[in-house]
């Protein structure tokens, strides 16, 4: 199963997600929204923001590499299939959608709960 996660969407944290799929999506959103070095007991958690103010092509390449490395490390039930960029480079705003595939073999019981 594939799911698109839009980084422009903001969602509240749910302490007890209703399904395992909701939990995985929330975990991936948290990884994408967290700046690396901002979590006191795990400074590697999140995505580096060092690519800000770099040329758009270089920033996209570095951001994609950071996303592809971080998601399987912190949410092994998800695999990055594609990172999609949109937005006006003239404005300096970049919208990111991450397409993930859920690794069903790593789910509790092999199915979504």
Image (cartoon, rainbow, N blue to C red):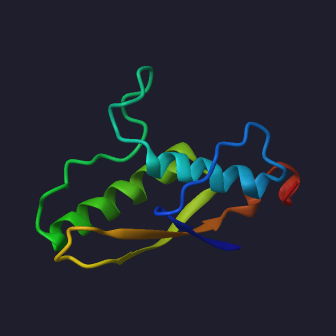
Q: Left or right? Give the position of 38 relative to 7.
A: left
Please state which of residues 13 and 63 is positioned toward the viewer in this rendering: 13
Where does residue 15 sit, x and y in percent of width and height?
Answer: 74, 36
Q: Residue at x 45, y 48 (%)?
A: 33
Q: Quadrant of the C terminus?
A: bottom right
Q: In the current view of this chain or complex, which residue is farthest to the top?
A: 41
**Residue 38's spot in the image, x, y percent?**
36, 31
Is 52 displayed left or right of 16 in the figure? Answer: left
Q: Is residue 85 above or below residue 80?
A: below
Q: Residue visible at 84% across and 50% down? A: 18
Which image quadrant for residue 13?
A: top right
For the image, the number of numbered tags is: 0
Q: Residue at x 26, y 48 (%)?
A: 49
Residue 59 % position (x, y): 20, 64
Q: Which residue is at the front of the view, 95 or 49?
A: 95
| Quadrant that contains the N terminus | bottom right
Looking at the picture, how far across and down is residue 34, in whole percent? 43, 42
78 sits left or right of 90 in the view: right
Residue 80 vertical position relative to residue 34 in the rendered view, above or below: below
Determine the residue positioned at 12% across, 61% down. 54
Q: Indicate the quadrant where residue 45 lies.
A: top left
- Front one among 79 and 13: 13
Position of residue 79 relative to residue 108, above or below, is below
């Amino acid at each position: 199963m594939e799911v698109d996660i839009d980084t422009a969407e903001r969602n509240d944290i749910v302490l007890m997600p209703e399904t395992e799929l909701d939990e995985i999506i929330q975990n991936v959103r948290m990884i994408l929204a967290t700046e690396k070095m901002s979590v006191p007991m795990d400074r590697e958690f999140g995505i580096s923001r060092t690519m800000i103010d770099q040329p758009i092509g270089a920033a996209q390449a570095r951001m994609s590499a950071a996303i592809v490395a971080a998601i399987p490390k912190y949410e092994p039930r998800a695999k990055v299939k594609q990172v999609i960029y949109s937005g006006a480079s003239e404005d300096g705003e970049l919208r990111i959608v991450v397409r993930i595939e859920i690794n069903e073999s790593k789910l509790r019981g092999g199915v979504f709960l």
